[in-house]
Image (cartoon, helix red, strand yellow):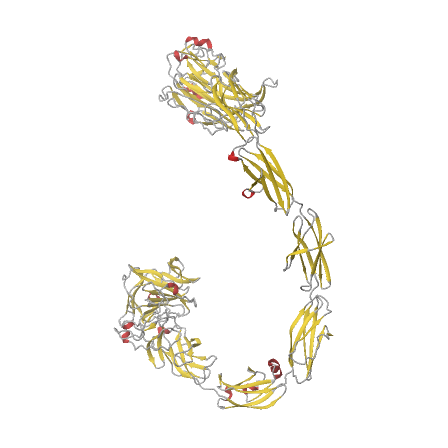
Amino acid sequence: MIFKNLSKLSPISISNQINNNHSGYKYTRGVSSNDSFNSVACSGGICGNGGDAGGNGGNGGNGGSGGNGGWCSNNNNNNNGQLSKILVVQINATYIVVSSFPNNDCSGSTLAVSVVSVVNGQCYTSGLGKSYKYTLDSGAVTVSNYLDDACSVPLGTTINSEPLGTCLSVPLSPGINRYYRFQTSEFPLSPLPYFLFYEKHITTSNCGDTTNAGRVLIGVSETCVRSEAFDTLITNISPQAGGGGLNFNYATSTTCGQGTATLHGVDCPQLGSVPDNIAYASVVPSPYGLVFKNGTTLTLTTITIPGFSSNMPDYFTYSMPGYAISYQASTNGIGTRIPLASNCPATGCTVTIPAPIPTPGKGIRIYAIPNLYVPQDMGGTYVSKVMQLPYAPNVTSINFTGATADSVTFDYVLDDSSYGSETTYVVKVNGVESSSNASCVTGPSCTIGGLAAVVAASGSPNITLSVSAVTSSFSSLKVLSVITTVYQPVTNIQIPTLTATTTKSVSLSYALVGGDQRFPISVSVKVNDQVSSNCSSTPANFTTTTSCLISGLTPDTTNTISFTTLNNGYQYTQSTTIKTLASISGQTLTVVSATTKTVTVAYSYIGGAPSDTVVTFTVNSTAVTCEPVQAGGSTSQCTISSLTAGSTQTIVATFTNDGTQVAATTVATTYPLVANTDAIIVQHNSYFNVSYSSTGGVPGATTYSALVNGASVNLTATPAGYFIYTYENERYPSEQTFTIIMRANNDGSSSQKTVSFTTYVVPSGFSTNQVFGINSVNMTWTELVGGQPDSTYYVATLGFESGPNIVMCNSTTQLYCYIDNLVSDVEYQYGFYAYNSFFNPLYSTGDSHTYPELNENCIDNCNDRGRCMIGNCDCNLNPQWDGPSCGIKLSSNTTKSIVLTPSTTDTASKPILSISFNNQVKYSIGLLKLVEKDTVNNNNNTDVRTLDLTTLSGWTVTAGNSLTFRGQGLSIFFGATLVDQDNEEVYFAGQRYNNTAGSVLYNITISGWTFASPDNQFEIHTSISNPSICNDTVTNSKFETPNNLTSSLLIGDSTVSEALLQGKLVHASMIDTLPNIISYRSESGGTVNTTTIVAVTPSFRQSITIQPSFHIINRNLTQECATTDLVSSATKNLSKLSPISISNQFNNNHSGYKYTSRGVTNDSFNSVACSGGICGNGGDAGGNGGNGGWW
C-alpha cells in the first residue's frame, strides 16, 4: 500500500491544541527540528496516532492499524459518503486538478490513488503524435483530444462538460473502475511523500517553463492509471531501482499491462528531447524537513525571514509560487491565525504585523505554508517558529504649562527614553485622537488648540486629555488621562421643525447648541432680511426649544431664514431656506359612470394646504350633495343622486383652499329608464322559443324574469335574450293558449310586456291521387287543413328504380301536378308531400306503371319472319333474315369481327367513333352540334343556342372506346359498346329489347346545359357515314318511324348492296335520372354519303342520356379487300389508342349484356358492364358515378 513503510519514518505526534478550528485532533508526520513540524488537519473526525508497522492506532480513538494509523477517520459521519456534501469552491481557474479514487466516493474520506494538475486551456502532447487540453467553462471541465501535437486538429472529447466536484466513473480495466473528481486551484500540485511524481512539459527540450507544466502524483500501489488525456493508459508503472527515475509505458496502450515500459529520468536534459515531455520522474521522499533559515528576527512591527530550507530535491520545489506566512498570537497552539503574506519567495521576505499588535512581550507562533495544491484530506506541509514581542514604553506624567479659552499646553515624561525618535505619542481629547499640532506627536511638549469646537461638540466645558506612547506601532501598556476645561461658544442651531403649513405661512422651531450660560445670549431671526418678532428670543436656558409661526408669505416661493446669536461677545450666524406651498390649481372633473338617476364623478387638484381643501358641487346651477365613494390618492370620487333619467346635467365642482377658489365643469347624461320590453314567440313542434329585449336602463345591468301561464321560468339556464319553453311531454298542444309575461328590471325601474298566443290546429286532411297514362301522370291532392296560416306548400316527386326522387312540382296553391314525356310501360315511384311551418310533413308515396303504347306496329309486320318488340323487329326467330322488317336475306358468311376506334384527339378533329366490320366494311358516327329551340311563344322553333361540336377543342379519349369533353360548364360523353352475341337483351330507360350480335350501342350523355326556358326543346345532331366496302361507298338511305316507340335508319340497297347499315333508334332517354320519351328525325348530311340523325328531347335540369344502336347487315359480303387500306381511315390511330377487337367468340363467359344509364350530373357518368347476366345500376343523378360500364 501507499503507506506500507510508515514504520520506518520519524515518530508521529498528536497535539489537540494545534488548531481549535477543527473538531478533531491533528495528525503530524515527522518533526525535523524543535520549531518545525509537518501536520495534516482533520475535519469532522478524530485522528489516530500512527504506530509502527503492524501496530494499532493510538489514543485517537479510531486510528488505523499499522502504517495507516495516522490518517483521519470521519467518526461523526457528517458527510455519510454522499457526493452532495462535497463543497466545491472555485478559487481560481489557473490550474485544473483531477483526483482519482478507488471507489465511488470522491469526497476525500478515502485517499486518492492518483492526482493530476494541468493549466486551464494549455495544450499538452499525449504521445503518438496526438495532443489534449483541459478547459473550464461555467463550472464544468471538458477534456478535448486532437489528432496532431499542437491541439489544432480536433478528434473529440473524452470528458465533456463534467461539473466541478462530481464523482465520475471511468473504467480502468475489466471489472475495475476509477472515480474522478475535477477541481480548480491557483497553485500547482504539491509533491506528497511516498507518491510517484513527474512533470509534464509543453515542449520536448525545455523544463524551465514553470508556469505551464503539468504535475502528476501516482500512488505506489498503482501500476496502471488513465493517462491525462483519458483516451489511453499509463501502464507497467514502477520506480527505478536506486531512485533514478520511473519506468512506465506512457499513453500507448488501452489495456493495463500491455506495452514496454520506458525509463523516464529524474532530471531534464537541456539538450536533446525529453521522452514524452516528461521530466523529474521519481518517488517523492519523506519527510520534507522544512525549516526557517537561521537569522529569522522579530522587531516591534515586522518579521524578517531570510528563507527556508528542506531536504526536498530542487526539481520538486523550483516552480513553487512561494510561501503563505501567518502568525498566531498564542504560544499554546490555540488561537486565530492572522495572515501576513500570501507569497513569500523561497529566498525570504520581511512582513509587517498588522494591527492590532499582540500584547508586548507576548509570545507568537509564525507559520510558513508552501503555495502548492494539496488534495483534500491528503495532508500538507508547513513550518512554524515561536518568538516573543518586545515591550513598549509608557508616559508616566503630564505637566500642564498653559490654557486658554480655545487651547491647552502641556509636557509629558516617559519611563524609558531609550527608543529615542522611534517613540511617538498619541494625544486624545475626550477620547478622540488630536492631530491639530504635529509637535504633539513627537513631544515631549504639546499645545492643543480648537478646543472650543470640542467643547461645543460634547456640550460640556470639561475636556479629558489622554496621552500614550507608541514605539514602532507598539502602544504602551499605560494611558495617562487628565480633565480640564475651556470656554465653549455657540456652535450650531438645531432646527427640529421647519414646515410649510399653508401657501402663505411656515412653522419653525429651533434650539441652541453650545454657549456659556454664565453670560446672557440673544437670538435674532430674520425672514427675507426682515426681523421676525414672533421668532426672535432671549432664551433663559440654552436647552429651551423656541417655536413660532411665520406668516404673510407669498405662495410657491423660496424664503431665506437667518439666525444670529450673541454670547459673551461671540457672534454665531446660520441660515436656511424653505419654500411655501403652491396655491391650489390643476383641477379636473370627469364622469366615471352614470345610471338612470345618479352620476359618479372623479375630481382632482394639485397644490394648496394639506387637508384644507373644500369641494362643493352644483348640478345645473343648483347646489347638490356628492357622497364620497373613493378618497385618497391623486383622485377622489363621489356620487350625485336624485337626478332626472335620460337628461343631460352640467356639473360644476368648486375647490376652496387657503383663501383661493377654482372650479371645474363637466357634462353628464343619465340613462333613460328601462322601457319597451318586448317578447317574440316562435313556435316549434315540441316547444316554443321566446326572444325578449328592452330599451333604456344602465347598459349591461338589465335583468329579466318570465312567467308562462303564471309559472316562473328559470332564465339563468339559457343564454341571455331568449328561452325555450317545452310543451308537456314534448307534444304539440293543439289550440292551447299561452300567456307570457316578460319583466325587465334595471336600476330600480321595471318594464313589462304580456304576450298571448294560441297554438295552431295540427295539420291534417291531406289526401292524394295519381292517374298514369301512356306517357304521363296526373298527380292531384287535397288542400291541407290546419297548421300555420299561409305556410303550406306542396311537393310532387317522381323517381325511377333506386334513383333519387326528382321534384316535379313545388307550389303553395296548386293542388295538382301534370307530368308528360314519360316512357310507356315503365314503373315510376311517386311521392306527395305537404309541408307546413315547423310541423312534420304529411306525405304519400308509392309506385305505378305507365300504360303500354297502343301503336306498337312494326314495319310490314316483320314479314312474319320476326317478333315485334317495342316497335322494332327482332329477326332472331329466323336468323337467315335481317333488316328493319326482317326482309333482307343473309349470306352464309356470318363471321363477324368488329373494331371500334375513337377519332383522334386533335383540336381540329371531329368527335367521331369509327367501326370496322370483318376488315371489309367500315363506317363512323360523329357528333355535330347541340341546339336549344324555343317551341312556344309563337317562336316557330327558333334556335336559342347552338354549340358546334366539330370545332370544339379539348376532346379526350377515355375508357378505350369513348370520347369526353369537359369545359364551359358543360360535360359531354360519347361512347360505344359492342353487342357480341345473338338475342342479346338490352335494358335502357326502363325497357328491354334485343339487338343483333355485332350491334354497337352508342351512349351520348350531355350534362351542364343551361336552358333559357324549361319549356324549350333540346336537339342532339349526329352524323352517320355511309358504309364503305373495300373503299366502295354504299349509297341510298331510308329513315322510318312506324310507331311511337322507335325509328329505323337503313343505309344501302337491300337488293344490291353486299352489306348495309341498320340503325335502331328507341324513343327513350334518361333525363335527370328519369325515363323520358324523345323523338328522332333524319336530315340530309352536311357532306356527301352521310346522314344526319337528330334526337329531339325535352329540357333537363341536370343531364340527358340517349342510346341509339347500329349494326352491319351482312347480306352477301364476298369481296376480299386487296389491302387493309379499306379500313385505314377507321383504324389509322389504332397503334396509338389500343383499340378493342371483339368477335362473337371473344368472350363466351358473358351470357347476357345489360347497360343502364340513369343520367349524368356534375360531369360524372354512371354505367355498369354486365358479366354473366348480372347487371348493376348506374349512379344517381348528382352522384359521383364513374365510367364503370364501359369496356
> Closest to the observer: 90 or 333?
333
Against 744, residue 879 (above or below) is: above
Left or right: residue 1063 versus residue 482 is left
Extreme residue toward the left, this view: 54
Quarter of the image for residue 56 reads bottom left
Answer whether residue 121 is visible to the viewer in this image.
yes
> Closest to the observer: 433 or 818?
818
> Closest to the observer: 373 or 704?
704
Q: Which residue shows up at 26% across the image and 74% down it?
A: 55
Percent across and percent down for residue 323 are 41, 75
Label tally:
0
Of the 4 image quadrants, the one containing the C terminus is top left
Percent across and percent down for residue 435 are 57, 82
Extreme residue toward the front, this view: 710
Of the 4 image quadrants, the one containing the N terminus is bottom left
Percent across and percent down for residue 1026 are 47, 16
> Closest to the observer: 597 or 497?
597
Quarter of the image for residue 359 reads bottom left
Answer whether residue 1006 is visible to the viewer in this image.
no
Percent across and percent down for residue 719 are 56, 42
Against 482, residue 1121 (above or below) is: above
